[in-house]
Amino acid sequence: MKIEQLLLKKTDELKKSSEYIFYKDELENENTQYFIIDTHGTKTNIEDRYQESDFSSYTWNLKQYKQVNEGDLFIYRRPQSSSEISGEFYFFGAGKFGEITLFEDGNVMADIVKGLKFTDYVLKRELDEAKWFFKERTRSDWQYFFNQYGMNKITKNDFLMLLDYSHSDGLVTDVVNLESKVDTELNKSYRVEDKMGRVNLRGSDHTRFAREVKANYEYTCAITGIRTKKFLVASHIVPWSKDKDNRTNPQNGICLSSLMDKAFDQGYITISPDFKVIVSEKAKKDDYLNQQLKEYHGNKIKLPTNNFPNEMFLNWHRKHIFNTVK
């Protein structure tokens, strides 16, 4: 199948996604331009004249870039120099340029509207075989592929490709609401009340928890070392249903592969106070399962860059889940 046909097929599939629908008006406007912008998080210039904050505002200098218009769309990139995931840059969200203000010193600040956090980061490791349209990638190490001053004009096809990579089955899109974002940061509450429909809904609260936990562990299973994102799960130590106050607490989560998540959830493995894997005797009832698990018995888990597993939660898991397996 030719690249043009594959592209049309992918676009048709993506049009059904919540991300496409969210930006439908802009994507179907032939005047919309598309960009990748690098960000290092919140920063303030020396004179305190403007502040740059993810999903709130973005600044650049006209001497470096003059092509952005109000209403254009962009993808956020965290460059490797600022990434908490060692050896990786990643893409973590999208947005639309709102009102643009020009300062006398040539700096420009744009308000960011229609912010959208990806359900999962799009990691450098995933993009080795990606087909780019805005320029040809000629080096395997990514050097010189992105502009050094932090802004790259891309095509609509590139924008759609990165949206497609951002999908995670079972998680919902996380639209940025600045007021709720500020409230969460001020209150530091991890409590989530039940949201009842036909089923008990977790929604964007679980999305944020999963994204933070997996990023803390650098998208690597803490037990096996598996790094393929499709096989990774943000596993609760104390289950969602058992503790409303810590449902989104990153210290109540461990990044695990699908099998290890299931084994942990069902009590076939647990984690000791010194962060070592303990395999239940019950695993011996299934020779093949036991072979998979015993390899890691006594091994220390990979610890995260932030928010180590809370000992109180691990103790609860050993007492109420691991020791009750039959």
Image: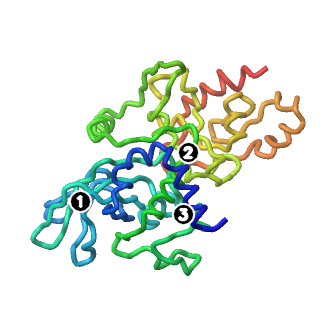
Q: Earlier in the sequence, mark 3 or mark 2?
A: 3
Q: Quadrant of the C terminus?
A: top right
In the image, residue 218 above or below residue 236 = below
Three-letter residue code for mark 3: Lys
The image quarter containing residue 318 is top right
Distance between mark 1 and mark 3 Cα atoms = 29 Å
Q: Secondary structure at mark 3?
A: helix
The reply, left or right, for residue 48 in relation to residue 129 is left
Q: How many marks?
A: 3
Residue underneath mark 3: 124
Q: Secondary structure at mark 2?
A: loop
The reply, left or right, for residue 205 in relation to residue 95 is right
Q: Earlier in the sequence, mark 1 or mark 3?
A: 1
Q: Residues within 10 Å of mark 3 (few under 14, many from 20)?
A: some
Q: Quadrant of the N terminus?
A: bottom right
Q: In front: mark 3 or mark 2? A: 2
Distance between mark 1 and mark 2 Cα atoms = 30 Å
